[in-house]
Amino acid sequence: MSRRGFEPRFMPIGVLTAAFQELTPREKRDPDPDLAVEEWLDFAASLGADSIQLSAALHPDEADIPAEAMLDPVANTLDLRAPFTKERASRVEAAVKGSGVTLADLAYFDNMLHEDPATRRKKHEFMLRVFDAAVLLGVPAVCGFVGRNGALSMDQNLDDFEASFVPLLQEAKARGLELRIEQCPMPGWTTGDSFHNNIAYTPGTWIALHRICERHGVGDQLRIHYDPSHAILMGQDTRSLFQYLRDEGYPFLISGFHVKGQVVDPKGLAAWGYGGQTVERGDWVEGRPSTRPEDQAKAWKKQSELAEHELPGTARHDPLAYLTNRSVDWLDHQLAARELLDIDVANTPLIVEHEYSPARVQDRAALAPILGGSLAFVRHIDRAAASMFALQAEVLPAQGIPVQGVGREPYRS
């Protein structure tokens, strides 16, 4: 009889630094920008994290969308107003070594297909600075969005992607980097009626974009940083989504994970459906888009009237919600990733992204047990899934022992 040892493989657990916008007060970090990175590494170590996803963004003084207009403001923990030099990189690397917390990748979430040429150019130039910082820091990837040209149709955006985004991927290739795209549709990014303001929002478009990349020799640079909260927002479930990628020959596309949930509000769903609130949001005033950031933020009712983000571990266990794709079944998420995707488990971090608004406190002492508890939940869920997978896919089959039951099935209504 053949034997196989029990060898579960665990994923490292990390956190996106946007979870705490001002861990280092701005009056201290603006004149000494790398202090914010050092303090975040120490904070992450105190939480028990293995890594951080280091958030970069245009400085608040330079951003075209004010933080007040965003559902979840981005963070410029990595401040790139001044050139990121070898000396700055050495300082950050010393902090990495001292904290024992690694850098999973860098993140810059912005609209790379913005319809205004000058705004787009500014964002692309910043992305190249993020690429250069990634090289100096020795990280393998940058995580971000594709975005959407709001003046064009979705099909026209494929052409715009080919003309404008592929050159960014060529720059990534020249630096030995992946550009990992998160699939949030960003429904409230604009006051327009479009729900899909990031064209890379679903596997069908990932594959269409990847085919364009393959034609230009940059297929290996485009990867997906999967976030199950966005699948729930669009009525999808993780297992079917992963199965679709495998069926279509693209199980390699996902190479990173955000662990953030979404809890669909049945009342909001009854009122508006999966398109979210479409009228009388308050983001238009006197027949035109409001110029006030607090009014522009109301465009996010396209999402927030339908669902609310979940910080993993903070939502009650709800089997019915899992079965109806109204909340993330975290255990099956981790099983499905191992069963259906082509991933290097031990080198694929799970990055906790904290966007559960009621718990998004910006006080270190108050936030620490919230984030620490969520990270512990994610770690234990992954360890449980890894143990189940090792038993069911490796140990038992090696001895010819059948696995019991059926489990969750893809494409099942």
Image (spheres, grey):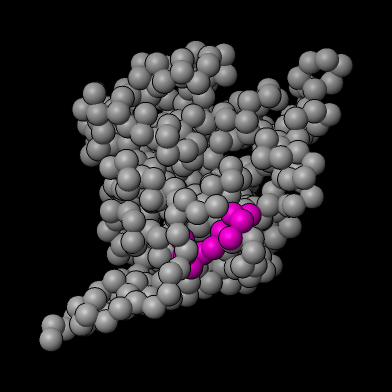
Query: Looking at the picture, does residue 40 appear above or below residue 121?
Result: below
**Which residue is at a point 34% across and 72% down the rendered structure image?**
389
The magenta-colored residue range is 323-333
Where residue 287 appears, as percent x and y from the top left, is: 83, 15
The percent coordinates of residue 393 (x first, y second) are 29, 71
The answer to whether any part of residue 121 appears in the image is: no
Q: Residue at x 45, y 68 (%)?
A: 407
Residue 154 in the image: x percent, y percent?
Answer: 50, 21
The residue under the point 47% across, 38% down is: 202
Q: Examine the image and state in which quarter residue 279 appears.
A: top right
Out of 339 and 345, give the one closest to the viewer. Answer: 339
Residue toward you, 109 or 321: 321
Total marks drawn? Answer: 0
Quick check: can you spot residue 2?
yes
Asked whether residue 327 is drawn in magenta, I would say: yes
- Residue 106: x, y in percent? 41, 46
Quadrant of image for the N terminus:
bottom left
Q: Is residue 128 magenta?
A: no
Relative height, residue 7 to residue 263 (above, below): below
Q: Is residue 170 left or right of residue 159?
A: left
**Viewer-proximal residue, 96 or 159?**
159
Q: Nearer the viewer, residue 228 or 190?
A: 228
